[in-house]
Image (cartoon, rainbow, N blue to C red):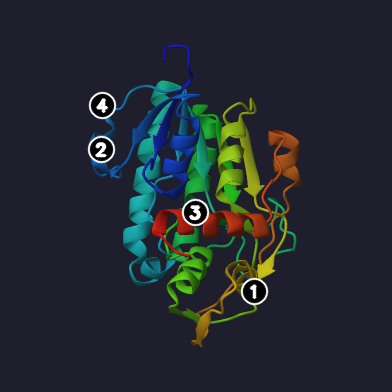
Amino acid sequence: MKNKKKIIVIGAKGFIGKNFCKKYKKKFNIVEVSRQHGNLAIEKSWQNLPKAKVMIQLANLNSIEKSLSSPSLLIKNNINLLLNALTYCRKHNCKMIYLSSYVYGKNPIIPTPESQSIVGNNPYALSKIISEELINFYTNYHNVNSIILRPFNVYGYGQSKRFLISNIISCILKKKKIKINDFNISRDYVYIDDILTAIFKSIYVKKKKLVLNIGSGKSFKIIEIIKIVERFVNKKLFIEKTKQIRNPVQKTRAKISMAKKYLNWKPKFSLKNGIKQIIEYEKKNRGFH
């Protein structure tokens, strides 16, 4: 283990964290940090964590719905947690890889470059924007090397059914009704394995500071996703149309040329292939036929 690079993963039990740790456990000496280590928004929870060369910071409260009803709770938690993480990185001369999110608001240029102005149109996105500013400050004034990844809509096997693609697949396999508010909302979906590869490649980048979009570079409407799933399972989805959500972002599509340039990264999974992987996973692990 002594010859392997030590990586500390904050949020190791979340969707991205557990998949990263599982995939790269033989490649790195990984320190997995989660809620079992205490409330990471409190400084003392960090006191006994071992020194590492690279931090992958994934931990945060991320429910947009809950953030709208309790914005101060989410923002305080996410910012305090990040400040503790940055303090750790400064103390241990540790590089930070931070997973931000889509932060470009309702009407960005399509495809959207990293230079697009950022807008916090919900408390979760706002917490990410503040977090990015804090990281930039620590990079500029405290020499904390950082890579900020802005993943668009991440999906994949084992993801919570709170997320659209997992929910659609779960409902159609269980023959349950799904509630959809707008069939024409269009999103850039990036598969979990492509996200993991982007994080892995970020570990070896030598630049002091980078901000990179991570997406597929393509955009799909909800109705297109439903049709793909229906074709794979040869079943129809039961759909209930509901009221449109407040201030929806109508379309997202990432410009990913910067990630290609600096990470030598590009997505390998098409939406069809990613959905096929999830369906096979669900059938194998949940007993659906």
Marking on residue 281 = 3
Q: Disc 3 versus disc 1: distance between alpha carbons?
A: 19 Å
The residue positioned 49% from the left and 31% from the top of the image is 24
Q: Amino acid at mark 1?
A: Lys
Task: Return the x and y of residue 277 as percentages of the image width and height.
Answer: 57, 54
Q: In which quadrant is the N terminus drawn?
A: top left
Q: Is residue 107 visible?
A: no
Q: Tell me if mark 3 has few (under 14), some (14-19) or many (20+) residues whose alpha carbon lies within 10 angstroms of its own.
A: some
Residue of label 2 = 37
**Image location of residue 185, percent across then percent down:** 62, 75
The first of marks 3 and 4 along the sequence is 4
Mark 1 or mark 2, earlier in chain = 2
Quickly name the residue at label 4.
48
- Looking at the image, residue 112 sits to the left or right of residue 129; the answer is right
Return the residue nearer the eye: 28 or 49: 28
Viewer-nearest of discs 3 and 1 = 3
